[in-house]
Amino acid sequence: MPRLLSSALALRRDPRILKIPPYLSLLCILVGAVWLFLLPLNEYSRRTYISENALLPGQVHTYFGGSDQNVLRAYKQEVNSLVGKSNVEINDKLESIVKGLGLKTARQNFTYSAAGRTFEGENLYAILQAPRGDATEAIVLVAAWENVKHELNKNGVPLVLTLARYFKRWSLWSKDIIILLSPDSIAGPQAWVDAYHDAHDSSRVASLPIKSGALQGAIAIDYVQEHRFKSVHIVYDGVNGQLPNLDLINSVVNIAGGQMGMGVALQEMWNHNDKYPDRLRTMLRGMLKQGLGLASGPHSSFIPYHVDAVTLQPFGEGWQDEMAMGRVVEGTFRSLNNLLEHLHQSFFFYLLMHRERFVSIGTYLPSAMLVAANFTIMAIFLWMKSGQPEVPAASTPESSDKDAPTPTAERDLFLPLAVVALSGSLSVIPLYVFNHVPESALTPLFYLFLVINTLLPISISLTTTKLFSPTLQQYHLVKSFSLLLLGMFLSSLATLNFSLAMLIGLLSAPLSFVKPYSSPVSRIVGYVLLNLTSPPAVLLASAAIWGLNVGDILREAAVAWHVTGTTSAVVVWCVWWPAWLAGSVCVLGQPAGQEGKVKRA
């Protein structure tokens, strides 16, 4: 035992130990990235399955069709006559139709302001009371007048009206059915759901005059094409990377793909051959959308309230018509009608790579955790390194005593903590500015910030050098504290929004290996390269790749911030950008003097 303890102490004092962490950090990044690319393989993914037996998807015969086709055509004519009219005029006509079906109707006004624009409108909704229920639970059927691309939902609205008339004739419903007709696909559903759960701002969103019970699920129809379709596209991404229960998606796939014989697509992968490249592309598209955290349809507003919801979009050229789409909705509603409790058996955290293939959180989470762990490893390594004296221990008289304590350098914490605190405090400025200025000012302000972002680390570095003459130890501590915070935030975020944590972690990976350089040329080259991975530079590059104006991206982010509560901007500006700023100050640093005074531990 004494020999083992002596060996452990000798190993602790071995300077070669401190050479391992940088390589271990790089290994974590590489393994985390490779892990992600292994997920589409059969050995790491699983086939989807229904966990909630009460759903019984595809086990009932659907009757929607026949004479309902004529009703749909009549409603289409009514809807087409409303094109170009105001929201109020449209609701006046639609309300008269819905009231004619014998349903209770109500309206709700809302007004949102974001990026200097005002988003206002009026929701129309109706409640079909369940003949066999007690108004304690409800299912929502949504049709927005315009989809997220601002295309007129020409077939979606008439189909929902036809389904409401059809559902009214059946006495099998044990849950109320709510018909929601909103003017748009983002602000309208968000205002309605917020008010339904009494979580709205009464100065902007009106309360709901009538309500039903707890919402058990929601289906939105986005049916813009007027010709027959081939397949159904399931849109399931929620706000801030939240997802509906996997059983809901599996039920729709089972009904549409199995019972109805339709194709089913995910993440706009219109032709999926279930091979590795298509699986990987589907998974990465889903990760990108979940990382951005934007609403992808009317369903997205429901998911934060634990209401499982999806949007169904017909696409392609085929022989399926509106009746087939209606039967998919009917089958899904009858499955949800069977539920005795909220969906909870299946997964809420998953990555889909095919309609019948997924990976759960236990399989994919280690990749993001490994990337986040590399920052923590480097933070601990730099903390230990900052405590090493400049004079080797072997040159001191005490070094002959093997049991003597390891000498350490006294750490000067004030300046490192001040730099890290300053970086974090400054992050509030871009977060506030880009979410509160008018749309016309977003683009010029962004390019102004791009210049400031380039000059700010230089000014901080020159100021600290002139006033405080930072030592190499202090630069190590700046980087240590910064990486410690980054690793802590990303590891916590990975359990909530894996995709965003993984994206930010990989983009921040160079920060683990930056250091002060003695050569001016090395400092300039290092700073230029690091500047290419800054948040503004990545945003500019992303806009160029997608063919968008950077102002459009910032406008969508501001609208998402004010309307749906998207918090991705907080992670970008308050987690990633401060870490980049602190890393840039370290790269430009010019250490002076000794690292610290030697003292006995």
Image (tube, helix red, strand yellow):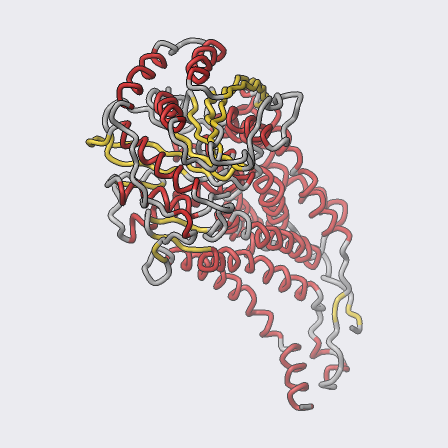
Closest to the observer, 539 or 341:
341
Closest to the observer, 184 or 540:
184
Above-or-below relation of 428 to 46: above
Residue 483 horizontal side relative to residue 53, left or right? right
Based on the displayed image, in which of its 4 quarters is residue 481 positioned? Answer: bottom right
In the picture, the quarter occupied by the C terminus is bottom right
Whether residue 537 is visible to the viewer of this picture, yes or no, is no
- Residue 262 at x, y = what percent? 25, 39
- Residue 437 at x, y = what percent? 60, 23
Judged from this view, the residue extending furthest toward the right is: 600
Residue at 75% x, 73% y: name it. 407
- Residue 318 at x, y = what percent? 20, 32
Residue at 46% x, 46% y: name it. 245
Above-or-below relation of 121 to 393: above
Judged from this view, the residue extending furthest toward the left is: 319
- Residue 478 at x, y = what percent? 67, 53
Above-or-below relation of 313 to 487: above
Closest to the observer, 184 or 330:
330
Closest to the observer, 544 or 237:
237
Residue at 39% x, 44% y: name it. 249
Whether residue 426 is visible to the viewer of this picture, yes or no, is yes
In the picture, the quarter occupied by the N terminus is bottom right
